[in-house]
Amino acid sequence: MGDLLMQSELATHSTFEFKKSNIFLMIILSIVTIGTYNAYWFLSRKKYFRNLNTTDAIPYKWWIFMLIYLIFSFLYSLFGPVIFTEYGIAVLDSIDIILAFYLVGCLNYSAFRAREMIEDYFEEEIFQSWLLAVFNIWYLQYKINRLVDAGGNL
């Protein structure tokens, strides 16, 4: 009975099913899209994180909201002065600053929840907190790529 449990656990770890991504391309997309790619990254990996069968949750509804906000903010930065008055621009700039801080908080919260989910799955510490705080999804994806290359075996 114990051997069967151990074999099924090893089989589960060997089927670590995250998708690999090019880190350099992720950095470029994050910069060019002014952070919109970060929201997309979490939303596009939703099923992979849910397959880890852990209790920690990434706030996907907030990421949908952030994706919509980031698209609107990007369009506003391009066309805002044409559409809005000076007062309207000042109000939207204030909202933009507040939501930008919330976005950074949501990004850090989600990155650390993702770390906990992956580390709970492998029952081992994999990530360094300071690198995760500084590089967020880039560091997460780097470690995920290494886990995928290793076949889910540490």
Image (cartoon, helix red, strand yellow):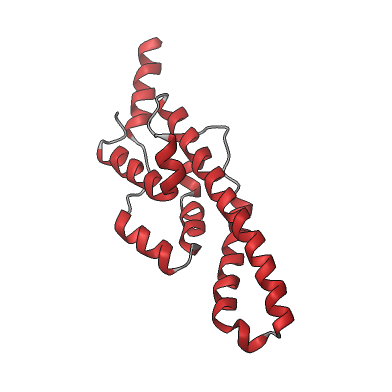
Question: Residue at (50%, 48%) from the top-left corner?
Answer: 46
Percent from the top left, x then y, of residue 17? 37, 42
Percent from the top left, x then y, of residue 24? 30, 58
Q: Quadrant of the C terminus?
A: top left
Is 106 displayed left or right of 21 in the figure?
A: right
- Determine the image quadrant of residue 7: top left
Question: Residue at (51%, 33%) from the top-left corner?
Answer: 53
In the rendered image, is residue 58 in sight?
A: yes
Q: Quadrant of the N terminus?
A: top left
Up the image or down, 50 lies above or below 102; here it is above
Closer to the camera in the image, 37 or 10: 37
- Determine the image quadrant of residue 69: bottom right
In the rendered image, is residue 52 in sight?
A: no
Up the image or down, 128 lies above or below 138; here it is above
Percent from the top left, x then y, of residue 42? 49, 52
Up the image or down, 99 lies above or below 135; here it is below
Is 153 displayed left or right of 40 in the figure?
A: left
Q: Residue furthest left?
A: 149
Percent from the top left, x then y, of residue 68? 60, 66
Is 49 displayed left or right of 151 in the figure?
A: right
Q: Residue furthest top?
A: 1
Q: Residue furthest bottom?
A: 82
Closer to the camera in the image, 117 or 7: 117
Up the image or down, 26 lies above or below 76; here it is above
Question: Residue at (54%, 73%) from the top-left corner?
Answer: 74
- Determine the image quadrant of residue 122: top left
Closer to the camera in the image, 23 or 4: 23
Is 149 displayed left or right of 58 in the figure?
A: left
User: What is the total number of numbered labels drawn onto the structure image?
Assistant: 0
Question: Residue at (49%, 62%) from the top-left corner?
Answer: 35
Closer to the camera in the image, 91 or 38: 91
